[in-house]
Each structure stands twice: as structure tokens, then as C-alpha cells.
Amino acid sequence: MRNDWRDEFRSGLANMVDQAVVSGAKQAEVFKATIEEIERLRIANERDPDPADDVSEHTVEEPANDWPAAER
């Protein structure tokens, strides 16, 4: 059971590669794009391992009630 997630990951990855090739991509291009995307994800994770923990920098403002129909 030690490699259950790896087996599932491997199967999912193989399915994605197959889908891309069936859609017309060349297998070598799919492999290259996959490696590039994994590298991008690795770098993003090093910069911010859990972006969901970040406090929002945007202030949520109340809607304005100064438009004509708001006076009713």
C-alpha cells in the first residue's frame, strides 16, 4: 500500500498524456510541456507553499447606494 498515491498519479498522468496525443499533440511536446509545468509548480510552491493561508490584500467595500434605483 505504500505506493497507492504514486500508482494513481502515474495512471492519471498517463491518461492525460494519452488524451493530449489523441487530440493531436506530439508525445515529445506533451512530455516537455509536462516537465515545464511541474517546474513552474515547484517554483510557485517554494515561493508560497500554501497560498490559501495568505491574507487578502484587497479590501471588500460595501456596495454604493447612490444609483437612481436605490432611492426606492
Image (cartoon, rainbow, N blue to C red):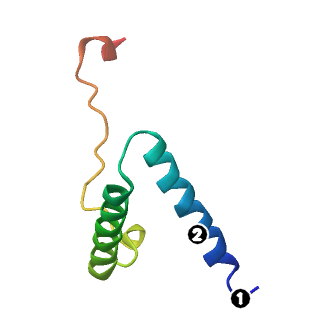
Instruction: Kindly check if marks 2 and 1 are in contact, taking CB atoms under 8 A apart as contact.
Output: no
How crowded pointer 2 is (Cα within 10 Å; few <14, some 14-19, many 20+) is rated as few
Left or right of 3 in this view: 24: left
Q: Where does residue 34 sit, x and y in percent of width and height?
A: 36, 63
Element carrying mark 2 = helix
Name which quarter of the figure residue 28 lies in.
bottom left
Q: Where does residue 12 sit, x and y in percent of width and height?
A: 58, 61
Q: Where does residue 35 sit, x and y in percent of width and height?
A: 33, 69
Element carrying mark 1 = loop
The residue identified by callout 1 is 2
Left or right of 67 in this view: 13: right
Against 68, residue 31 (above or below) is below
Q: Which mark is residue 9?
A: 2
Q: Amino acid at mark 2?
A: Phe
Name which quarter of the figure residue 41 lies in.
bottom left
Against 72, residue 55 (above or below) is below
Name which quarter of the figure residue 55 lies in.
bottom left
Q: Nearer the viewer, residue 30 or 59?
A: 30
Q: Which mark is residue 71?
A: none
Q: Where does residue 39 sit, x and y in percent of width and height?
A: 30, 73
State which quarter of the image contains the N terminus. bottom right
| Residue in view at x 31 percent, y 11 percent | 69
